[in-house]
Image (cartoon, grey):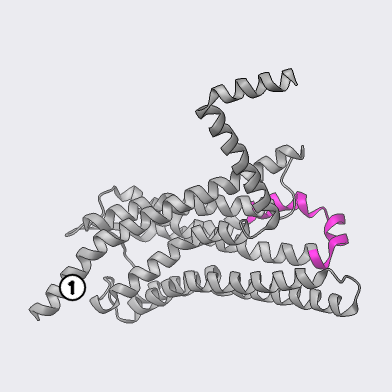
Amino acid sequence: MNISHDCRSLSWELTRVLAPTLDVIVMLIGLVGHSLVIYILTGRRRKNGLQSLQGTDMLLLALSFSDLLLLVCLPFHSAAIALGYWPFSSILCKVISFLGVACNSASVFTLAALAVTRYLIVVYPTWTYRFRMRRWLPVTVILMWVPAVALAAPQFAFRQLRTAPILCFAFLSDLSQLVYSTILFLFSFAFPLIIIVVMYIKLYSFLRRTRLQGTAPQLERYQNQVTKTSILLVLVFTICWLPSYILMFLLISTNNSNIPAQHLNFAIIARLLASSSAVANPLLYAFMSNKFRRELLTLGRVCCKGCRCIMCPGNKTSNGTNSVMR
């Protein structure tokens, strides 16, 4: 019994160090990645002299916004894990819990909307142009936050502080917790995943059919790219979020609000994967784009030139003099 207790104590001590460390790494990578995405997307609009973002750029910007809000919640959870108790107020307990569910749901809804939009743009380009989908995308982004906020609203009602030790705890009966968790699983994971899978399968089928008809030979390379990207997107989405829902239902089934020692390692991995989704999204949806990578390289060259000019101001003068003399 003492050995088991010592092992559990050691595991929790490691968790209190490991989890915040991993959170810092995830947060730094996420902040850099999303900052680059936002800068390039908004710079693309300015460069083209547009009033609004084109195509899926609006959805990518919305995805970065919701993921950044998710990253903002990380330090609060990290502090609670490191200290072993919730050091903040009851209001922050409710607000951070609300933001976590709302931003996660909005992010997932945006991924589903991206899949639908890409399918419509490729398969029905004339219809999307006549329908002026670009004008409707900002409305779509706003509407996606309505169900996201609705799913997160109960957090304000049942999140409270529990003493000895102070924890940000959900006061719900077993049945209520099961119902709420099932609703979250269906609307924030299962249904969006089905939409994403169906849309990419339909897109693949359309490209394959078009290529076999010989109307667009260049589609073979695009079809292969879409196939690989689609499989990767579905796998990453599933791997990032499924462990968290498994852990959630596992805790409900055992009638235990605290994580048992035997599930502690799984809980750490599940939490890391869930928070990593905020980092994976810009990598998959933006950095995998050839156009985005070219713009990123251009930005890198401009930054390097700027650094060289700052570090060696004399070179700029001499180069300017030489160019005038020539």
Measured from the top left, where is residue 40 in percent x and y?
64, 45
In what quadrant of the picture does the C terminus appear? top right
Q: Which residue is mark 1?
A: 8
Q: Quadrant of residue 195?
A: bottom right
Residue 143 appears left or right of 242: right
Q: Is residue 124 magenta?
A: yes
Provide the residue span drawn in magenta. 122-143
Residue 325 in the magenta stretch? The answer is: no
Horizontal side of 27 relative to 317 (left or right) equals left
Q: Residues within 10 Å of mark 1 (few under 14, many from 20)?
A: some
Compared with 35, 63 (above or below) is below
Quarter of the image containing the N terminus? bottom left
Specify whether residue 195 is in view: no
Residue 237: quadrant of the picture = bottom right
Question: What SS does tag 1 mark?
Answer: helix
Q: Nearer the viewer, residue 184 or 301?
A: 301
- The residue type indicated by label 1 comes to Arg
* Quarter-of-image position of residue 42: top right
The residue depicted at 54 percent of the width and 45 percent of the height is 35
Q: How many marks?
A: 1
Q: Residue at x 56, y 28 (%)?
A: 309
